[in-house]
Image (cartoon, rainbow, N blue to C red):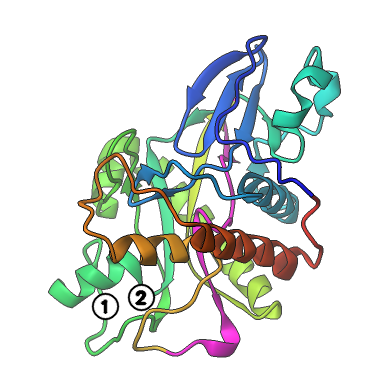
Amino acid sequence: MSVNTVFETNIPSLNLFNRGKVRDIYDLGDKLLLVASDRVSAFDVVNPVPIPYKGRVLTSLSFFWFDFFKDHVDTHVINQSLPDAIENYEDCKDQLEGRSMLAIKADPAPVECVVRGYLAGSGWKEYKQSGTVCGIKLPDGLVESDKLPEPIFTPATKATDGHDENIPFETMVDIVGSEYAEELREKSIGIYARASDYARTKGIILADTKFEFGKHDGRTVLIDEVLTPDSSRFWPEDVYEPGKSQPSFDKQFVRDYLETLDWDKTPPAPALPDDIVRKTSAMYQDAVKRITGKELEV
């Protein structure tokens, strides 16, 4: 069976609003069409080789989590079928099916809402240097991948090019105002806590994750993607062992491979070999099966 990968959509009949690292966004007038491609970015650089089924995984998981949290937070999801929303849908069905989401037009907050329950990634790097994460003082003696005493909120600036930058909460207050900042912190930690509890029932540790929010008609809404392998660190609980890096259900194979190369993490990225692509695709699909209890529809 041939694999339908989509590296970049090309739909002349639709108005392309933005092409991000992974998503192509089309303006449908009163709504947006979000299309998750199979592009993969590592160290904020898009690789020239797509990961089969990746866009379908991101979309499937986002739909699952948006539905999971619908009674706790407003979301940007519009429950309308694609054929009803898009003229000549059949002409672009192969580019959209299984990887697309209709969304309201929200005004996105200019800050990413990151919640960390474990010490990993850039948080671990900062802790080794200063004993803090985004300026938050943590207990002495923690090791890599340790569970934190309680989840912490560590916002970051959004970078259209280059790397996102962790910022103290006080800087977020300066950017969006104290009331909005407090609301986003409370919502983010609450969503993380519920998702973490659910993930543990599936044998998965939610180490950290990133949320994005926006405003629509005066309401705060959860937007973009939610709790996917692109926006979160998922670790298998049965092999969790503090003191080292953990295996994860995401693009860790990609990062680990690229770290072995003499590459300065600036574009263009070195093309991924077939075995790394296969392993990464398999891990993404495994995440869907574990979290939703269903095989990915392909």
Going by the numbered disc 1, the residue's amino acid type is Leu
Q: What element does badge 1 sit on?
A: loop
User: In the image, what residue occupies the spot 48% across and 27% down?
Assistant: 19
Q: Residues within 10 Å of mark 2 (few under 14, many from 20)?
A: many
Q: Is residue 182 left or right of residue 189?
A: left
For residue 220: magenta?
A: yes
Distance (Cα) linking label 1 and label 2: 10 Å
Nearer to the camera, 205 or 138: 205
Residue 195 percent across, percent down from the top left: 62, 66
**Residue 14 lies in what quarter of the image?**
top right
**In the rendered image, which residue does mark 2 sit on?**
119
User: In the image, what residue occupies the spot 25% across and 61% down?
Assistant: 134
**Residue 74 lies in what quarter of the image?**
top right
Q: Earlier in the sequence, mark 1 or mark 2?
A: 2
For residue 44: magenta?
A: no
The stretch of residues the image draws in magenta is 217-241
Q: Is residue 253 left or right of residue 243?
A: right
Residue 242 percent across, percent down from the top left: 40, 88
Q: Is residue 279 left or right of residue 81?
A: left
**In the rendered image, which residue does mark 1 sit on?**
138
Q: Nearer the viewer, mark 1 or mark 2?
A: 2
